[in-house]
Amino acid sequence: EPEVTQTPSHQVTQMGQEVILRCVPISNHLYFYWYRQILGQKVEFLVSFYNNEISEKSEIFDDQFSVERPDGSNFTLKIRSTKLEDSAMYFCASSRPGTDTQYFGPGTRLTVL
Amino acid sequence: GENVEQHPSTLSVQEGDSAVIKCTYSDSASNYFPWYKQELGKRPQLIIDIRSNVGEKKDQRIAVTLNKTAKHFSLHITETQPEDSAVYFCAASTRVTGGGNKLTFGTGTQLKVEL
């Protein structure tokens, strides 16, 4: 069964550095999402992406965040200048047309020092 | 925006007993309600879902009920087993204008099934 994949599984960075988190959604899915989960807390929506555009973003998704689909398979989340509070697990998800079911990747644990 | 409340935050049951987790939501436009199971350090795994035009759905030992009028939905697990121990999240889905949908999650329930 196809799954969403994410790389790296764990990223450690210094405050102020840029990071790029990578995701490969399921191949016939057209809607892509990023969520984050701070340790011990609930999963929070960051952004949805469809047809090469952001379709919705949350208050968390400020100017420091950006998303891109650089080719036919990858979907990336960039944080330009990381802060300590960006430390969290970041999940990518995807869904196919005609359904609301979202499938989550294994996550990237981002640690900002 | 949507707000989802989930109770209880922790639930401990004896193996073989039933477990019930309850959620409420605020946005009447929400039309899809999935439940995810998350084991420590792992991705959320969809275990069951229900659409707003359905009142109840069952899949083996797991069932979900939805009361659209009261804006609450519940997860029922019967004959619990130790491998059911995990954090369970409810979510409410709202359509996004540009395409797709947005999930708003509850705060999670830590279920522990004791032998």
Image: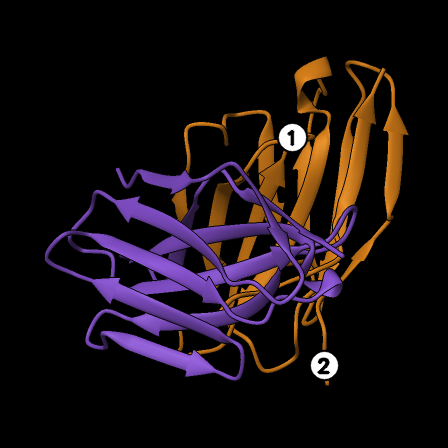
Residue lying furthest left: B69
Q: Quadrant of residue A79?
A: top right
Q: Amino acid at mark 1?
A: Ile
Q: Which of the two discs, 1 and 2, labels the residue nearer the N terminus?
A: 2
Which structural element holds mark 2?
loop
**What hue represents chain B?**
purple
Q: Name which residue lies at 79% across and 33% down.
A: A110
Q: Nearer the viewer, mark 1 or mark 2?
A: 1
Residue at x-position 49% and y-position 28%: A60
| Residue at numbered disc 2 | A2
The chain ID associated with circle 1 is: A
Give the residue number, with chain letter if any, for mark 1: A38
- Please tell me whether residue B57 is drawn above or below residue B34 in the rendered image: below
Residue A51 location in percent, x, y?
Answer: 46, 65
Amino acid type, residue under disc 2 in the picture = Pro
3D distance between C-alphas at marks 1 and 2:
27 Å
Q: Quadrant of the C terminus of chain A?
A: top right
| In-image side of A4 versus B92 (left or right) | right
Q: Which numbered tag is attached to residue B19?
A: none
What is chain A's hue in the picture? orange
